[in-house]
Amino acid sequence: CQGRISDGGVFNNSILAKKIYDESLNLLSPKALPGQQEKSPYVFVCDGAFPLKENLMKPFPGNHLRGSPRRSFNYRLSSARRVVENTFGIMASVFRVLRKPSLLQPEKTNTIVLACVHLHNFLRRSESSKNLYCPPDIFDT
C-alpha cells in the first residue's frame, strides 16, 4: 500500500500532468480578459502543492504583508478555489456517481461528468428548483 498521496503527487502521476508538461493538452488559445489588451492563457487553479506552469496557477508561497499585491493575489486565488470546491461539493452531494473513482471507460466518464455539470447548471438557474437545490446562504460567500 502506497499510503496517502498528496493532490500534487496524484497530479504528477496523471495523464493530465504529462499533457500539460509536454504542451499536448490542446487547450484553447490565450485570449484577452474583458477590458484588457494583453492575452492571458487558460489556467487550472491549484494550491501550493502543484508546480507553477503557464496553465497552472498557484499561490505565492509564504506569508505576505497585509495589502501587498502577493497577499491580494493569494486571497483572490483562494476565493476562486473555494468556488470550485463548493460547486463540486454540491454536485457530489446530489450526483453520487461523483463520490467515488469511476470504473468506466474515460469517454463514458466524460459524458457522465458533463451530464452532471449541465444538470447542476440547470437546477441552479431554474426558478422552480434553485432554492431547493442550493438554498441561499448554505455556503460561504
Image (cartoon, helix red, strand yellow):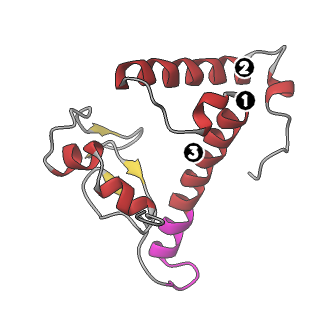
Could you give the CA–CA distance between mark 2 and mark 1, rounded to whole angstroms? 11 Å
**As rendered, which of 80 and 93 lies closer to the eye?**
93
Q: Residue 63, relative to residue 44: is it above or below?
A: below
| Residue 102 x %, y % | 48, 32
Q: What is the number of the mark on residue 94?
A: 1
Quadrant for residue 127, please give it.
top right
> Would residue 134 be found to the left or right of residue 103 on screen?
right
Q: Which part of the image, by quadrant, shows the N terminus?
A: bottom left
Question: How far apart are labels 1 and 3 at the CA level?
Answer: 16 Å
In magenta stretch: residue 133:
no
Query: Would you place residue 77 above or below residue 28 in this image?
Result: below
Residue tagged 2: 123
The kind of residue tagged 3 is Val
- The local secondary structure at tag 1 comes to helix
Instruction: Determine whether the residue tagged by mark 3 lies in a helix, strand or loop.
Output: helix
The circle on residue 84 is 3
Q: Residue 120's image quarter?
A: top right
Magenta-highlighted residues: 63-75
Q: Nearer the viewer, mark 2 or mark 1?
A: 1
How busy is the neighbourhood of tag 3: few (under 14 within 10 Å), some, or many (20 plus)?
few
